[in-house]
Image (cartoon, rainbow, N blue to C red):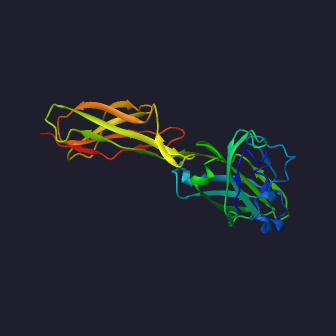
Amino acid sequence: MRIRVAAAVVSGAVVLSALALPVAAQASERAGASAKLSSFASKTVRPNDSLGNTKFSQAVINGGKDIVLGTTGTKSVTVTYTATDQNGVALTEAFLWQGTDSSTTAGITGGLGTDDNPSCTETATQGVYHCKAVFNIHPATDMKDNGAAGTWKLFLGAWDLYANASYNDDVATAAIKKSSTLSADATPEPVKKGKTITVTGKLARANWSTGKYAGYASQPAKLQFRKKGSSTYTTLKTVKTSSTGVLKTTTKATVDGYYRYVFAGTATTAASTAPGDFVDVR
């Protein structure tokens, strides 16, 4: 089952809709996302809300790392969690959603579902299940008009063996960030000792709407230098990008070595480091 939850077409029951059907009906309806956008609409679901006897814990999204997306390809993100219910667990569902309130259209800015239902295995402890869900995220389609970079929440739902539904709409959080690129070019090469060199570069990040990378404006980047034969870079200064993401500064050349820019990242954009550019000092 895969549900792309667009805030423009679904209500707060969005994330809950997969749990709306009886267990027997789930198998035949997995391919039809629209069939799941119905029930639970009368439920009041607020941030960090939960319902039912199934409890969810130990959720880890993408191994605890940020989810970084470029403009093409597919990013497979694994989510692991524990579901506990003394009445057993027949089925679980997982969604990543973004927003402030899962009960209103205005409160949801984006959502992602899984291609298949999560797999759960009962442990040696009765009623305790270890589960895994895989999200295959396609930035070119999933992120183009659906959600934004920043913090996303994990919604988990379950049916027990008696067809009782449970859910929690804020089990864990993860950052989905835009990939970034960074370059550095030091000139002239070679250069006389003590002379000034100019180090230019550009910081760009993925634009999911256009499918291209665009300059990232007004961002700080560190200019660093590594002496030939050394493995350690030293920060020389911090430079801000222009309105088009361009970096440019000058420094004195004293010995052979490598110059690079380093971007620490933001809440919406992943960090990046430019390859070192070698300058021969004569």
Q: Is residue 220 left or right of residue 11?
A: left
Residue at the spot x=61%, y=48% of the render? 144
Query: Can you say whether 249 is above or below 158 in the image?
Result: above
Q: Position of residue 233 (x, y in %)?
A: 29, 41
In depth, the one of 129 and 234 nearer the eye is 234
Q: Position of residue 121 (x, y in %)?
A: 68, 67
Residue 91 is at least partly visible in this image: yes
Q: Quadrant of the C terminus?
A: top left
Q: How many marks?
A: 0
Q: Quadrant of the N terminus?
A: bottom right
Query: Can you say whether 72 is above or below 31 in the image?
Result: above
Query: Which quadrant would residue 281 be assigned to in this image?
Result: top left
Q: Residue furthest front?
A: 210
In depth, the one of 142 and 12 nearer the eye is 142
Residue 270 is at least partly visible in this image: no
Q: Position of residue 187 (x, y in %)?
A: 24, 38
Q: Residue furthest left?
A: 282
Residue at the spot x=61%, y=43% of the render? 148
Q: Position of residue 7 (x, y in %)?
A: 72, 45
